[in-house]
Image (cartoon, rainbow, N blue to C red):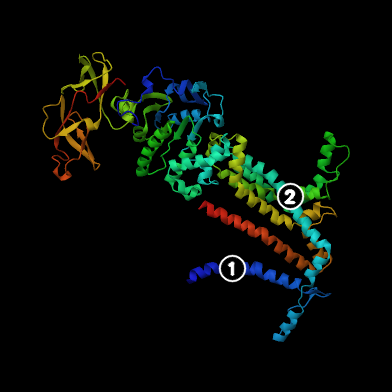
Amino acid sequence: MDLRKLFLILVPYSWLLALFLIPFAIVLKIALSDYAIAIPPYVPTLDGIGNWSDFKTFLSELDFENFIFLTEDELYWRAYLSSAKIAFLSTLMTLLVGFPLAYAMARAASEWRPTLMMLAILPFWTSFLIRVYAWKSILSQEGYLNQVLLWVGVIDSPLMILNTNTAVYIGIVYTYLPFMVLPVYAALEKLDDTLLEAAEDLGCSRFQAFWLVTVPLSKPGIIAGCFLVFIPALGEFVIPSVLGGSDTLMIGKVLWEEFFSNRDWPVASAVAVILLLLLILPIVLFQRNEQKQREAEK
Amino acid sequence: MAFDSGSAAFAPWEDPGQKPLISFKSVTKRFGNFTAIDNLTLDIFEKEFFALLGPSGCGKTTLMRMLAGFEAPSEGTIMLDGQDIGPIPPNKRAVNMMFQSYALFPHLSVADNIAFGLKRSDMPKSEIAGRVEEMLSLVQLSQFASRRPHQISGGQRQRVALARSLAKAPKLLLLDEPLGALDKKLRQETQFELMDIQEKTGTTFVIVTHDQEEAMTVASRIAVVNHGKLVQVAPPDRIYEAPNSIYVADFIGDVNIIKGLAKPESDNRYAIQWCENHAPIIGTSQHAFASDDICHFAIRPEKVSITRDRPTDRTNTMQGKVLEIAYLGNISTYHVELPTGQVIKAQQANNRRISRRSFTWHDSVWLSFTDTAGVLLSQ
């Protein structure tokens, strides 16, 4: 291997090393430490290690106590499960809302498409926090939604939406919608219209042609969109803490409380390490999907 | 020509007792202000290999899309097998189409592409596999059944598209520029394959093409279309030998057009006065011209002989100077300038070595042709 190739490979790997592997090693080390009333709030630390025997003592003080603790307290695995459930259901809902949107965009006259695309991306130009807080004033009991519904006469008394899981679902679907719409749109836009004509010519109704041609051919986009929504939704912290109630259990919130309320860095780090390991599985699946798609396009 | 050889010539269009498979009855199709098809009437018969030939934008594709059901006529009716197909959607028509882009489903294997239409039909599941097998062997692709469209070559894709459109045994198969994406050699081979398959299956084929050579090779009849109207509908030899207008003569192959005044001589012989100080051209015409009618004498370059000395046995002779020689290997085309300034193209087979050719650039030569070699056209 010549130097140029080595250099080319070196750049992304050192990037990965500096920004992913080293921070992960630090977090893992904290997860293996013990809680202490100190600054930083854990022991042992790497400070003052001068020789080999010091390092050996340091290693002997690390243990898996915190990981064992996570399995003992049911709060944690319930939080993981509930996060997975919320992430899964909201991904499904985002798909149900996003697919028709992307489909309409792809079917729109070509001079309209850039505008529609712009509208889909536009919310990103405002702070995410502000948008989530805006939902608070929409969904609260005196909020706009309840006022409209009362005025129309659909309901007699205001609905309790804010501070429930429903509000969390609405928040996630709203926030992550563009992540679903854009890849699905990209897949649908590439779709050759003559394929649908061919399907009709061969005896399909419009609906069958959609189901047998459009949907399978947009599958790579659908899979990409689902992962792009599911992965960040699983560890979501802001939306459940702003819109969710006290009974909304999500691992991101547990993590935050462990770090900042309990100041138990080792347990919080253990929660983070497990979350990361759980996320690796969908990320690997996502990568494989991308790889397969690239090969198919060759 | 697929059928015209032999004694039992295939010519149902000449038999008034034959019922056409397709008939366009005063069909007009407008897109906004643009008239794509203009009051067109046409009959196509069973087992015909019918070519729609014309320049791009002439309306030939619109005609085909109306047969497939993707466009509805603005006026008039289209009958298929005695039934008005206007209100029938594409998926309910006994018509299949082979698309110019082939439109193969990229997510399905070759076999599944061919089976796609059969699965939508009422064919029992147990018979589908057999039919797919049959179609695959018809187009010689049996060993590629499990490949995806992107894993096979362009020529193979073309054959998959053909097999897919034939799988449902349609009454009528539409082919939209089916060979357009193939290179010349493969295109010529595939033309013969197409004719072979058409004969084997006995299906009526309607092909859209802008390639006149392709239309001449495969079709039993050709319709020359221009500006949404049929200019001429006839078998390839009639189109070539007896074009009904300058447009057709010029569109199909190469032609010399000489404008002049008709002077009837006897029966259908005419003397065409085309230049004051030159003997008139003697020609024959099936259509009558009155004395002093303006006419156009059209003659194909290969029917004009070129010689060094004046031939004595030809009715028409004229002298000129070689201006240009296009050497095409098997034949050469000579551009000969007459004293009047007019340039006449003459074609000759290169049956002698080129070094032994007896004339070259700027040589004075004689052009000659018989009185039946050309046709007289009024417009």
Left or right: B364 with respect to A294?
left
The residue labelled by disc 1 is: A13
Q: Residue at x 36, y 33 (%)?
A: B218
Chain letter belonging to callout 2? A
**Badge 2 density bin: few <14, some 14–19, many ≥20, Cα 10 Å:** many
* Quadrant assignment, res B178: top left
- Callout 1 secondary element: helix
User: Which mark is in front, 2 or 1?
Assistant: 2
Query: Left or right: where does residue A41 sit relative to residue B110?
Result: right
At 12% across and 35% down in the image, what residue appears? Answer: B308
Camera-side residue of B65 and B276: B65
Regarding residue B334, the answer to whether it shows in the image is: yes
Q: Are the two marked residues, 2 and 1, in contact with CB atoms closer than 8 angstroms?
A: no
Where residue B181 sits, quadrant-wise, is top left
What numbered label is drawn on residue A90? Answer: 2
**Foreground pick, A104 / A60:** A60
Q: Amino acid at mark 2?
A: Ser
Q: Residue furthest front?
A: B126
Q: Position of residue B302 (x, y in %)?
A: 23, 32
